[in-house]
Image (spheres, rainbow, N blue to C red):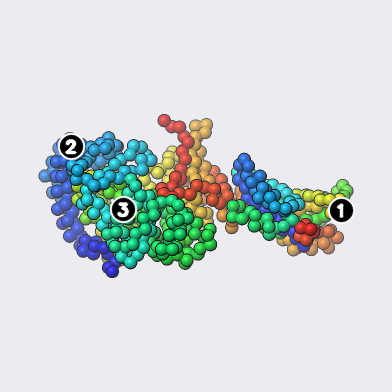
């Protein structure tokens, strides 16, 4: 039930981010979620896109990228929703490497993306607790 | 075909080599003294007469020539024959100052090309090989030297010159080149380009490469050998002494045999000028033994290396020089520490990075800074910033262990560092010290 995230390495230089995004945007691929982790020298652009295969093809050999499974958990539309998820993980001693959130239309709702080492175990814990996890099909749809 | 180009001289006994050298040096010194006023003055100043040089054991009495002398004598000051006897001029790249020009008579060209032919045969070449020469042609000695050597051998020569990698690859594949001659950095680039086009190392017909004209490491050798599916051999030379082929590697790949019937080698203490015994590290000095137009006596190369006379399994008897540990021109002094780009290359390849890097030296707040751009490979990429920073740190730590000073590492995307088709530029020194 994990969602595939596309991570692209970019130099921390003028114009590099738009260069990476440009290729993908010239097609009809929809970037559902985006987050950037950066240091002084480089940035890592993480995206959840509607058509992963096409996005990889468009990045081609000009970029270094990686596909990583992440978990997208639906959040209720009220205060404390994120905390509820994080507390569940903490109690189960699941270490989160990084996280970011995204929303779509009202019907789809808001999701938090979790990058963890053990995806399968985390999925099970969250599902057992009744959380709803997004699938690749929903994202690309 | 023999495993030697000139077996008699290449496997001659020690006594025979010394006999030839003694005979030649007496004539060479007399020739220089008679024809080159600049050197005659140096000898006179020392009170040395040509008759004082009775054999190679007297060479240490002769004055040294340095690159500065060559610059001072530009262009004709060291010419030892009438210009009308000369058939060719070559020149150094001039990257470290004013150019140096060297002159050749047909005799000089012949002996130089024979040396190159010996190198090609030592790399397994025969008259049935297709030798792709992608050293630059022109004033630079690389192209002409290997080209002439391949001709002397009777191999089919592909005079590609450097650059136009697309065409290099097309000819390599269509005409089935078996021996590649270029700078090691260009060989690495060709290997990378082949891979990009979907070729595996077994798709080409190459069996060997003869690479020189810039310093390279054992790690770089491994990387080229794997990338092209060949044996990579080193070749050494300087425009001042004729060009590539002064020394070359044999199948043992443990150092380069110096063509002692043409060049007499010494290792000296660079500070005192004193000749050091075999096996000790010092500056390499060459004396030409039978050149007509541009014979240099005791020319200080600024290359630091070691000479060894151990028996070689290839059967050649000529002395071996190790890969130069760096030419003083390449050495950077950063925060008082001597740093060679080759050391940085060694660490990169040991740590699993590519040999594509750029070194930036600068001075900020009166302190030298050392920054190295290093290309990231897809295998090393992680989506986690902390993992990537750990990689930079671990590489910087490995550099510190090797160099004695810690650089700042910058990981950059693949293929962003300029590739070289000739001598690679690896260092940009922005310090304004003068």
Give the SS element for disc 1: loop
Separation (CA) of disc 2 from disc 1: 95 Å
Residue A99 % position (x, y): 74, 51
Q: Quadrant of the N terminus of chain A?
A: bottom right
Q: Is residue A68 visible?
A: no
- 3 and 2 marks in contact (CB < 8 Å): no
Quadrant of the rendered structure where residue B231 is? bottom left
Which circle marks residue B145 in the picture? 3
Give the SS element for disc 2: helix
Residue B61 % position (x, y): 19, 43
Q: Work out whether residue A12 or residue B314 is closer to the camera in this orientation and state it.
A: A12
Which chain is mark 3 on? B
Q: Work out whether residue B351 or residue B97 is closer to the camera in this orientation and state it.
A: B97
Residue for point 43% across, 47% down:
B424
Quadrant of the rendered structure where residue B49 is? top left
Q: Local crowd at mark 2 within 10 Å, few (<14), some, or many (≥20)?
A: some
Looking at the rendered structure, whether the residues under marks 3 and 2 are on a common chain is answered as: yes
**Mark 1 = which residue?**
A107
Separation (CA) of disc 3 from disc 1: 75 Å
Q: Left or right: B367 with respect to B131? A: right
Q: Quadrant of the C terminus of chain A?
A: bottom right
Looking at the rendered structure, whether the residues under marks 3 and 1 are on a common chain is answered as: no
Quadrant of the rendered structure where residue B121 is? bottom left
Give the SS element for disc 3: helix
Residue A93 % position (x, y): 76, 57
**Mark 2 = which residue?**
B37
Which circle marks residue B191 in the picture? none
């Amino acid at each position: 039930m994990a969602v595939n995230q596309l991570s692209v390495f970019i130099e921390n230089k003028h114009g590099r981010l738009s260069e990476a995004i440009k290729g993908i945007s010239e097609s009809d691929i929809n970037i559902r979620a985006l987050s950037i982790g950066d240091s002084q020298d480089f940035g890592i652009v993480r995206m959840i896109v509607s058509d992963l295969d096409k996005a990889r093809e468009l990045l081609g050999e000009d970029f270094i990228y990686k596909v990583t499974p992440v978990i997208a958990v639906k959040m209720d539309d009220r205060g404390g929703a994120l905390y509820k998820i994080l507390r569940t993980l903490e109690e189960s001693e699941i270490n989160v490497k990084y996280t970011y959130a995204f929303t779509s239309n009202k019907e789809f709702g808001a999701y938090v993306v979790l990058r963890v080492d053990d995806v399968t175990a985390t999925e099970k814990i969250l599902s057992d607790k009744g959380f709803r996890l997004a699938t690749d099909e929903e994202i690309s749809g | 075909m023999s495993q030697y180009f000139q077996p008699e001289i290449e496997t001659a006994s020690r006594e025979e080599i010394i006999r030839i050298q003694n005979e030649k040096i007496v004539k060479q010194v007399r020739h220089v003294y008679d024809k080159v006023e600049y050197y005659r003055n140096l000898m006179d100043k020392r009170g040395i007469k040509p008759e004082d040089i009775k054999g190679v054991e007297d060479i240490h009495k002769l004055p040294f020539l340095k690159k500065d002398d060559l610059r001072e004598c530009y262009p004709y000051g060291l010419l030892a024959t009438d210009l009308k006897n000369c058939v060719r001029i070559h020149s150094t790249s001039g990257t470290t100052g004013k150019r140096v020009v060297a002159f050749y008579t047909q005799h000089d060209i012949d002996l130089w090309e024979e040396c190159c032919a010996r190198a090609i045969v030592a790399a397994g070449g025969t008259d049935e090989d297709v030798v792709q020469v992608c050293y630059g042609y022109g004033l630079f000695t690389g192209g002409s030297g290997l080209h002439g050597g391949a001709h002397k051998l009777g191999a089919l020569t592909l005079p590609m010159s450097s650059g136009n990698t697309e065409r290099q690859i097309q000819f390599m594949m269509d005409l089935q080149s078996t021996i590649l001659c270029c700078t090691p950095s260009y060989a690495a680039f060709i290997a990378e380009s082949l891979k990009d086009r979907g070729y595996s190392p077994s798709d080409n017909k190459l069996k060997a490469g003869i690479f020189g004209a810039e310093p390279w490491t054992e790690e770089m050798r491994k990387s080229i050998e794997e990338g092209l599916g060949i044996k990579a051999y080193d070749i050494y030379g300087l425009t001042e002494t004729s060009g590539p082929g002064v020394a070359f590697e044999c199948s043992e790949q443990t150092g380069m045999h110096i063509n002692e019937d043409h060049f007499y080698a010494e290792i000296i203490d660079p500070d005192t000028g004193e000749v050091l015994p075999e096996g000790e590290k010092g500056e390499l000095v060459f004396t030409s033994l039978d050149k007509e137009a541009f014979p240099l006596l005791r020319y200080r190369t600024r290359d630091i290396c070691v000479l060894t006379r151990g028996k070689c399994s290839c059967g050649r008897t000529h002395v071996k020089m190790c890969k130069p540990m760096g030419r003083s021109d390449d050495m950077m002094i950063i925060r008082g520490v001597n740093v060679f780009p080759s050391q940085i290359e060694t660490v990169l390849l040991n740590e699993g990075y590519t040999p594509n890097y750029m070194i930036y030296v600068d001075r900020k707040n009166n302190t030298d800074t050392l920054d190295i751009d290093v290309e990231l490979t897809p295998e090393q990429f992680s989506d986690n910033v902390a993992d990537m920073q750990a990689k930079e740190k671990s590489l910087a730590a490995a550099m510190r262990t090797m160099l004695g000073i810690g650089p700042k590492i910058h990981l950059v995307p693949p293929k962003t560092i300029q590739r070289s088709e000739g001598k690679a530029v690896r260092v940009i020194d922005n310090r304004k010290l003068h």
